[in-house]
Image (cartoon, helix red, strand yellow):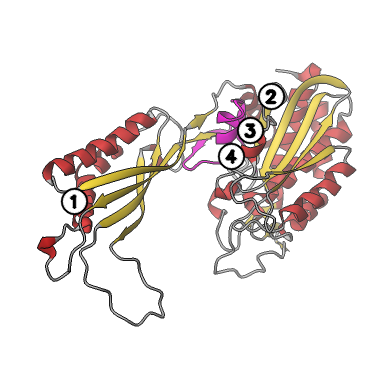
Amino acid sequence: MIDDIDRRLTEAVASRQEALTRLTQDLIRIPTLNPPGRNYREICDYLDGRLSGMGFHVELVRAEGALADSDANPRWNIIARKDGPHAGETVHFNSHHDVVEVGNGWTVPPFGGELIDGKVYGRGACDMKGGLSASIIAADAFLATCPDFTGAIEISATADEESGGFGGVAYLAEQGWFDPSRVQHVIIPEPLNKDRICLGHRGVWWAEIETQGRIAHGSMPFLGDCAVRHMGAVLAEMEATLFPLLAGKRTQMPVVPDGAKQSTLNINSIHGGEPEQAPEYTGLPAPCVPDRCRIIIDRRFLIEEDIAEVKAEVAAMLGRVKAARPSFTYEVRDLFEVQPSMTHESAPIVRTVSQAIEKVLAKRPEYVVSPGTYDQKHIDRIGRLQNCIAYGPGILDLAHQPDEWVGVQDMVDSATVMALTLAELLLPERRV
Ligand SMILES: [Zn+2]
């Protein structure tokens, strides 16, 4: 049911379309490249001006001592809060302000923020400065239309999501910013398409596997023990037993695309023997039997799987190789792990955004789960807040591509969904 408040909010967002476009363009024109983490302070200062002007109380927080934080490239974050005249719950919009490298193949200036045929172009347009702008305009429209609200709105722009989020949401979550006692609802406006709600993501385990042999002269390999051949046996065993095992595991999570509904494993890199020389080195390699070979594996696992079981499968596979090749030794080193995260469909934020999408787009939203992780992991695991989703404008496939863009109408539509969501959660007479 569309009522009078919904109609006024929809008009308030529509009348801000130009401001929404300009804000997106301004943000794209601050090149917040990560790595190494450029212009983080500049974008936070720009947002400070904007949000202070809307009556928000603003704090700039540097993630001092976090991974990658340095005086040359400090990890700055901004958190802005606007309290209503009455006590109530807090709705938090969290966007990352960093963007990935430009890459080749652009036909428009990557930091120009050009508006062409209803699309704003530039690195970060869709991932995710368009989403950040939509949340700010949604809040602006809501504050102008419904000043007598309960609770609070928070808007944050955080560092380093593209490199794990340790200098951003993870740091803030450790400092208590996402404690459920102060924040009750979180929307992350990542580009998941305006009619989809992303409930969470699969889990991750990165590890390095090293096979070890014995160095000897390459003319007498029988005096050594070749670590690369041992790795070959490991890879053959993986093909024969591990990949088929993973392909047989399917999740009930609504992961998109469909190929990611099963457990997956990528071999990220392989290296054996002596280090590769610089291109200007003109000499030949020395004849040696390699005594070590390393691969890095990137295993994505499902909510139905346990990380201990995931690691045990790899250990069992290595054990089978070892049984057939007694001379070889190996080591497995953990590099990184993230648990799967999935907010329940009955959570208040899911129900509320779902209802708003039905009103604005006249269709039922699709629930999806992301194949890769994003900052929800830190809000869930460190912040202990489960009432969190990703919802925002932009087409996911355009993220990290050349000629990245975000559609103005898509931003207006998702900003309207966000404004209606604020009304539902912060106007006492409207609570579902
Ligand atoms: Zn993103």
Residue furthest to the bottom in view is 282
N-term-proximal mark, 2 vs 3:
3
In the picture shown, does residue 319 fall above or below 275? above
Quarter of the image containing the N terminus?
top right
Residue 69 in the image: state x and y as whole percent. 64, 50
User: Can you identify the residue that label 4 sits on?
Assistant: 375
Task: Give the magenta-colored segment's residue range.
Answer: 365-392
User: Is label 4 in a helix, a strand or a loop?
Assistant: loop
Mark 1 or mark 4, earlier in chain: 1
Q: Are marks 1 and 3 in contact (CB under 8 Å)?
A: no
| Residue 138 place in picture, x, y as percent | 77, 39
Q: Residue 134: which quarter of the image?
A: top right
> Mark 1 or mark 4, which is nearer to you?
1
Label 4 and label 3: CA atoms lie apart by 13 Å
- Decide which of tag 1 and tag 3 comes sooner along the chain: 3
Marks 1 & 4, CB-CB < 8 Å contact: no
Tell me the residue that label 3 is attached to. Answer: 174
Q: Residue at x 25, y 73 (%)?
A: 286
Query: Whole-Å distance between the Cαs marked 2 and 3?
Result: 16 Å
Identity, as a three-letter code, of the amino acid under mark 4: Asp
